[in-house]
Image (cartoon, rainbow, N blue to C red):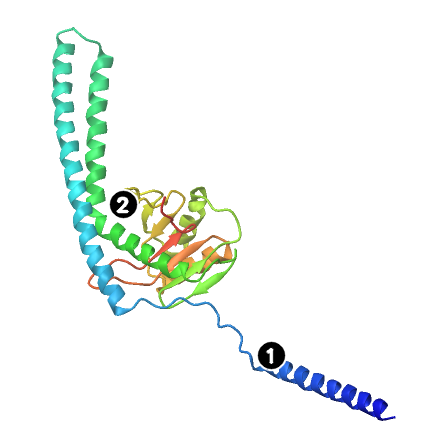
Amino acid sequence: MRLVLTVARNVAFACFAALVLCGSAQAQRKKTPRPPARTAPAASGDELSKLHDEYIKATKEYKASLQKLLALYQESVKKAEQKRDQTQQLFAAGLISRRDVEQAELAVTNAGLKVSEAQQQINTADTQIAQTLVEVEGEKQFARLGPIRRGSLIRTTSFIRYNGVGAWSLSQAGKIEIFFQQTFKRPLPIAVFGQGAIHNQWRLDHHNAMDISLNPDGAEGQALINFLQTNGIPFSAFRTAIPGVATGPHIHIGMPSHRY
């Protein structure tokens, strides 16, 4: 009889202990907080100051390289013009054909186009470098968030990232330009379309993207962002401004630019 009572007491104690442990586990699960939503910290004052210093250095180096390139192109124009003049004299003397003259004139035109392109790059260097530096800094913050699912929208104080829901290519740029032109009665302010010289120099893949010089928080920027999201077009909108620089905030249409 004692043995039966002892066994009964042991079974009862085991059941009670199990109930206590179960209740404790449930209470612990209820108290466990949910993980916070993923956010990226805003750029600090030190980071912005560093970004400004990088901008000044990069701008000087980039413009210096463009000035050297411009000088080479201008020299090529002079040589092409000299050859064209000689060709015209030979043609007047009946020594060469008209086709030779046309080829010489085409060479002058092509050389002049390279000069114009280099001058345009110098004129827009400030904008391109500021926007590219802001993108590079933004990508560092994006990397802290980990993988982002397709169709996800992330907002922070520094940027907005939308991954899109379908395939994107620059061939779709036309409908974006039409929307903006019809809405605001002016052309879409495209700063860089596809791969720019600064992207080549910094080895950034920008072939399938374009940068728009619009502040994401302005009326035009907000309208463009809404249009892109409605149409499932991926974009990154950067709000960060480099101290002392008028450019920087812009909207990058397409997937992020990665180093290669």
Would you say 198 lies left or right of 205 here? left
Residue drawn 42% across and 55% down? 235
Residue drawn 27% across and 63% down? 241
Q: Quadrant of residue 16?
A: bottom right
Q: Quadrant of residue 106?
A: top left
Mark 2 surroundings: few (<14), some (14-19) or many (≥20) residues within 10 A: some
- Quarter containing the C terminus: top left
Q: Is residue 226 above or below residue 202?
A: below
Would you say 185 lies left or right of 9 here? left
Question: What kind of element bears circle 2?
Answer: helix
Mark 2 = which residue? Answer: 198
- Whole-percent x, y for residue 20 in the image: 67, 86
Of 85 and 115, the residue lying toward us: 115
Farthest-out residue, front: 2
- Quarter containing the N terminus: bottom right
Question: Can residue 231 be seen at all in this image of the molecule?
Answer: yes
Would you say 123 lies left or right of 208 here? left
Question: Viewer-nearest of labels 2 and 1?
Answer: 1
Farthest-out residue, right: 1
- Whole-percent x, y for residue 31 in the image: 56, 82
| Dot placed on the residue nearer the N-terminal end, 2 or 1 | 1
Mark 1 = which residue? Answer: 29
Would you say 77 lies left or right of 224 here? left
Q: In this view, does 31 lie above or below 149?
A: below
Q: Please, what is the three-letter code of the amino acid marked with disc 2?
A: Ile
Q: Please, what is the three-letter code of the amino acid marked with disc 1?
A: Arg
Farthest-out residue, top: 94
Q: Quadrant of residue 85?
A: top left
